[in-house]
Every structure is written in structure tokens, then in C-alpha cells.
Image (cartoon, rainbow, N blue to C red):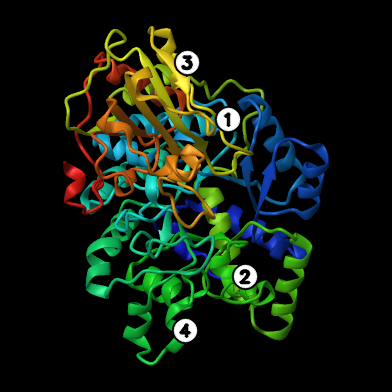
């Protein structure tokens, strides 16, 4: 086993850290060596689930639906007391609805790109890191380096920093550096780059279609910059890069479309050797169809490790998965040497984060969270983000004397991992300012003379396992005939997207259109202030909201 690379970036371990890694890996034997390769999801605080996780003894976990910060720290301390090595505790710190429970409602990456204020991105990232550390989290599967190039991509959408590589580079690298300065290791994703294929790797293996020169000018630039800036980990995704494979094996056939997560050419040859990445590689979620459509789990799970990933992300049947790894070791598909390499990098990351040192008590107040200040900052920065894309008839600002009777069409708020649609609070907020709000229902017969304003509220942020985000007129109106009615010729109309920024593709002639990027109540308040003329609109578009349509600008 070799350890010298742990003295180099991004680990930068001293002799004490190096000695700890050597001692820990020597102490691991038998099943524990393989169990450490797993990152398992822990939902909530059910004691039986906690005990099951302890019994499996993984090397890392991802937390969802946690309690308050003190309870979270206590839970993680309890786990660490009973496990062979301290846990890497991961989360997706992406802001908006993917923030932590009880945390300040921070903008998502696309909102920050619309603002394009590096100081704001740095402060948002610092607050997110502060709140995450207080809850015991030390690893984030962010920032996203994907490029919002294909507007139909529902998987990138609001999770990325837009379509301009220079903007993505400024904000993503800033976020990564701030996270790591504040004790949160970053995993940039989704290697080797998403956003030019408008499909979702949760549903199939997606393809990065760029030639290598274009890839270098886009994703190569972003990943090289992240590596130079010291990023600690990379998430290898279920995305193929056929141009690179063909540059080495011209007649590769279907192998050119092998997902990066199980491709030694992409993980080892391109990422490690050519880009010089020395840190940890974590796979993207392994139950995704981006892997499952390629081969069966008993085959691809060992391939994740043998092809260069150091951690297996998620398991629906951990005992079966462990058996797959054992079988692969027995028949030679997976080597002990490769398992050692993965464990050494995983332990190296833990030491780089200081997890080898005695940890403070879960009751320690060492990490203070300025809750009120953080929420105040979230409010302030959110007020600068809502983007007025067009207002052809100069309708805004709204006035309850002129636009008192409001008919609202709403598709509700749809967010990954939430049990069902959530209602907008903006209608109630409008009522507080003297507007009379009527919520449209499918059985309603609309008489245009009864209304002074039509307001469309759409709340699809980035979605997972949904192939497309679009303005579903039939669902919105509930009726075949009503789906074809466009009332903006008779009643002033405003359409607001609190998420997916490309709804003009389905409503190019709507006269007033706004992108707000995030569905949080904080952002809804910010939009209301701008609608009423209390704050100015942002005019910077981080993507092309017109989707290349000439008529959408009019």
C-alpha cells in the first residue's frame, strides 16, 4: 500500500494525519473493508433504522429529514462511537428547497448566477457551510459544474450556474473554496459534464456529445480549474463521453457509451492522469437507471470500484450489494489492491477534514449559527434576484386599485423528495395588500370582465426522474378546451416561473414574464416586493429564457 500521495493536494496530510490513515486501514479487516466503501442514506431519526446502519458499519452516510442541529450532532456522535472510522456525512447543499431542514432559505445556483455577484455567492455559501457543520455535515455533493446548454434539461435547470462557462467558473469555484475553507469538503459534479444532453441520467445513461476540443473548452476548463483550486472530491456520474473513448479506441462500439462511473478510461485516464486529480471519486447514486439500463447490479457495482470510484453512493439492499463485492473479489473482477486504494483516499479525506482528531462534544456550542442574521441575509439577497424577462405592455408595477381582482392559475410547487405538491403562499400575500384573489379550478367558467389581472404561478424547480419540465396547459386548466384559451388579449397577464426558467417555450407570446428560479417563501416575498414596485427588478438572464425563439421576445 502506498500513502505518499496523501501528502499532496488536495489532502495535504502531515505526519500525524498520515499515521492515522495507516493505523485505520490496518485495523480494518474482512467485511469491514468492503462495508467502508458504501455511502448509505439515513432518513429521519427512527431508532431501528439507526441501529441497522450501525450494524452495517459504512464509511459514510447521506442525511435527509434531519432534526435540529444539536440533535443531528448527537446522532452523528452516537454513530461514530460505534463505527470503525468516523463518518463522512454528506448532503446536497444546493439551496432553495434542497437546503437543510430549518436552515435559511438561500437562493439556488441559477438564482445566484442571475444575480452574478461573487460576494453574494461567497456569503450564501459561507452561511450554508456554517449551518451544515452545525448539523454535523462535513461533505457536500456540490457545486454543480454542469452547463445549462440544452434548455429542455430538467436535471440541470436550476441546479447549475447557468449557460455561460465563465459565470459557472466564477461562482462554482467560489462556492467550492468557501465550503472547503469552512470545513465542508466539496464534490464537484457531474463528471464528465451534463447539460448538452437534455435527458435525465436517473432514467438512462446520458451522453456528453462534445468533441474533445469543445469538451476541453467547456468542462475541461471547469474541472481543471476546480482541481487547481483544491477540490477534494469529484462525483463520477452515469454520463458517457464517447469522443474521449474514441480518441483511444476508435472502434470502441458500444463501449464508447459506457457510463463514466464504471469507466476506467474516464475516471483514471482522463480525470486522474490527464487532469491530475488526486482526490476522492464518489459515484453518483447507484440505483439510478443510468447504471441500471447499462447492466445488472451484480455486474456494475464491483465495476464502480474497479473503474476508479472510491465510494459507492446508496444501496437499496446493502447485504446483497456486499455479497456482490465479495463475489467480485473471489473471482478476480475486483482486486484487494484497488479496494486498498479506495480506502486510503477515503481515510485521507477524513483526515484532511480533521476527523482523526478528538471531536468536540455534540453539546458543545463551538459552532454558533446566527439564525436571525442568516435569514435576514437570505431575505436581502433574494430580493435582488427575481428577473423581469419581458413586460411588453408595461403592466408593472401592480396596483390593487387597478388590478384588484386577480385570477390565479397555479400548478403548485413540485420539488424532489417531497411527498406531494406544495401550495404557493403568494396569493395570500397579495390579499394582505388589498387584492381580491380567486384561485382557478377546473370547473370554473371564466368571465374576463370579472377580473383585472390573470396571474400564472408555476413552481417546477429541477426535477429528478421526470424527463421534461414544460408548461402543462391541460393540467393547469383541467379542461381540453380551456387549455387552448389565452386570456392575455382581454385581461392583463403576468406569468411567473419560480423554478424552470424556460416556460416561454410553451407560452412565447405571454406579455409579461418573470423568472424567480426558486419556490421558497423567501423568494415569493421577494417577487411580491418587485411586483409592487418596492424593489427593482433584476434584468440579467443567466440562460436564454427565450429558448432561441425570435417571437418570444415580443
Q: Is there a contact, CB below 8 Å, between mark 3 and mark 4?
A: no
Secondary element at image label 1? loop
| Residue bearing mark 1 | 101
Which of the two marks, 2 or 4, is nearer to us in this view?
Answer: 4
Residue at x 70%, y 78% (from the top left corner):
329
Residue at x 50%, y 21% (from the top left corner):
369
The Cα–Cα distance between marks 1 and 3, rounded to whole angstroms, is 24 Å
> Which of pointers 2 and 4 lies earlier in the amino acid sequence?
4
Quick one: which residue is furthest to the bottom in this view?
251
| Closer to us: 391 or 404 | 404
Q: Is there a contact, CB below 8 Å, between mark 1 and mark 3?
A: no
Label 4 packing within 10 angstroms: few (<14), some (14-19), many (20+): some
Which of the two marks, 3 or 4, is nearer to us in this view?
Answer: 3
Q: Is residue 240 above or below residue 545?
A: below
| Residue bearing mark 3 | 428
Q: Is residue 263 above or below residue 407?
A: below
> Which of pointers 2 and 3 lies earlier in the amino acid sequence?
2
| Residue bearing mark 4 | 255
| Closer to us: 380 or 527 | 527
Quarter of the C terminus within the rendering = top left
> Which of pointers 1 and 3 lies earlier in the amino acid sequence?
1
Quarter of the N terminus within the rendering = bottom right
Q: Position of residue 135 (x, y in %)?
A: 59, 31
| Residue bearing mark 2 | 339
Secondary element at image label 3? helix
The Cα–Cα distance between marks 3 and 4, rounded to whole angstroms, is 55 Å
> Which of pointers 3 and 4 lies earlier in the amino acid sequence?
4
| Closer to us: 129 or 408 | 408
Q: Position of residue 429 (x, y in %)?
A: 43, 15
Secondary element at image label 4? helix
307 relative to 148 in the view: left or right = right
Amino acid at each position: 500500500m502506498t500513502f505518499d500521495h496523501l501528502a499532496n493536494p488536495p489532502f495535504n496530510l502531515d505526519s500525524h494525519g498520515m499515521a492515522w490513515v495507516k493505523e485505520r486501514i490496518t485495523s480494518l479487516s474482512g467485511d469491514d473493508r468492503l462495508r467502508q466503501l458504501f455511502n448509505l442514506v439515513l432518513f429521519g431519526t427512527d431508532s431501528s433504522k439507526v441501529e441497522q446502519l450501525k450494524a452495517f458499519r459504512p464509511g459514510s452516510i447521506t442525511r435527509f429529514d434531519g432534526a435540529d442541529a444539536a440533535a443531528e450532532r448527537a446522532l452523528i456522535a452516537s454513530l461514530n462511537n460505534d463505527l470503525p472510522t468516523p463518518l463522512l456525512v454528506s448532503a446536497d447543499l444546493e439551496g432553495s428547497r434542497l437546503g437543510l431542514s430549518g436552515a435559511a432559505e438561500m437562493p439556488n445556483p441559477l438564482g445566484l448566477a442571475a444575480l452574478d455577484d461573487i460576494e453574494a455567492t461567497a456569503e450564501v455559501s459561507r452561511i450554508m457551510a456554517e449551518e451544515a457543520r452545525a448539523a454535523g455535515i462535513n461533505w457536500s455533493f456540490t457545486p454543480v459544474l454542469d452547463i445549462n446548454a440544452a434548455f429542455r434539461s430538467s436535471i440541470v435547470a436550476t441546479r447549475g450556474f447557468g449557460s455561460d462557462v465563465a459565470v459557472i467558473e466564477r461562482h462554482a469555484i467560489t462556492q467550492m473554496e468557501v465550503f472547503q475553507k469552512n470545513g465542508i469538503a466539496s464534490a464537484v459534479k457531474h463528471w464528465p459534464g451534463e447539460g448538452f444532453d437534455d435527458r435525465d441520467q436517473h432514467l438512462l445513461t446520458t451522453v456528453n456529445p462534445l468533441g474533445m476540443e469543445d469538451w476541453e473548452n467547456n468542462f475541461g476548463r471547469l474541472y481543471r480549474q476546480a482541481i487547481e483550486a483544491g477540490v477534494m472530491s469529484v462525483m463520477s456520474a452515469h454520463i458517457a463521453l464517447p469522443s474521449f473513448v474514441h480518441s483511444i479506441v476508435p472502434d470502441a462500439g458500444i463501449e464508447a457509451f459506457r457510463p463514466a462511473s464504471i469507466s476506467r478510461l474516464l475516471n483514471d485516464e482522463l480525470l486522474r492522469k490527464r487532469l491530475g486529480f488526486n482526490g476522492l471519486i464518489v459515484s453518483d447514486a447507484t440505483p439510478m437507471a443510468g447504471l441500471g439500463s447499462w447492466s445488472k447490479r451484480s455486474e456494475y457495482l464491483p465495476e464502480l470500484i474497479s473503474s476508479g470510484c472510491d465510494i459507492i453512493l446508496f444501496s437499496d439492499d446493502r447485504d446483497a450489494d456486499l455479497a456482490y463485492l465479495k463475489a467480485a473479489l473471489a473471482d478476480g473482477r475486483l482486486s484487494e489492491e484497488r479496494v486498498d486504494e479506495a480506502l486510503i483516499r477515503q481515510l485521507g479525506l477524513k483526515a484532511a477534514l480533521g476527523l482523526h482528531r478528538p471531536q468536540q462534544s455534540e453539546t458543545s456550542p463551538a459552532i454558533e449559527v446566527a439564525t436571525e442574521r442568516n435569514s435576514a441575509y437570505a431575505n436581502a439577497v433574494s430580493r435582488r434576484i427575481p428577473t423581469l424577462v419581458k413586460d411588453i405592455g408595461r403592466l408593472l408595477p401592480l396596483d390593487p386599485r387597478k388590478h384588484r381582482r386577480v385570477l390565479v392559475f397555479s400548478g403548485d410547487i413540485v420539488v424532489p423528495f417531497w411527498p406531494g405538491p406544495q401550495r404557493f403562499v403568494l396569493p395570500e400575500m397579495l390579499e394582505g395588500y388589498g387584492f381580491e384573489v380567486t384561485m382557478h379550478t377546473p370547473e370554473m367558467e371564466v368571465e374576463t370582465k370579472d377580473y383585472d389581472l390573470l396571474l400564472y404561478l408555476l413552481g417546477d424547480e429541477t426535477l429528478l426522474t421526470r424527463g421534461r419540465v414544460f408548461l402543462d396547459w391541460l393540467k393547469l386548466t383541467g379542461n381540453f378546451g380551456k387549455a387552448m384559451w389565452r386570456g392575455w388579449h382581454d385581461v392583463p397577464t403576468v406569468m411567473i416561473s419560480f423554478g424552470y426558467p424556460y416556460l416561454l417555450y410553451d407560452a412565447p407570446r405571454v406579455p409579461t414574464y418573470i423568472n424567480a428560479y426558486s419556490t421558497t417563501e423567501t423568494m415569493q416575498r421577494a417577487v411580491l416586493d418587485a411586483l409592487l414596485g418596492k424593489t427593482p427588478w433584476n434584468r440579467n438572464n443567466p440562460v436564454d429564457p427565450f429558448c432561441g425563439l425570435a417571437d418570444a421576445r415580443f
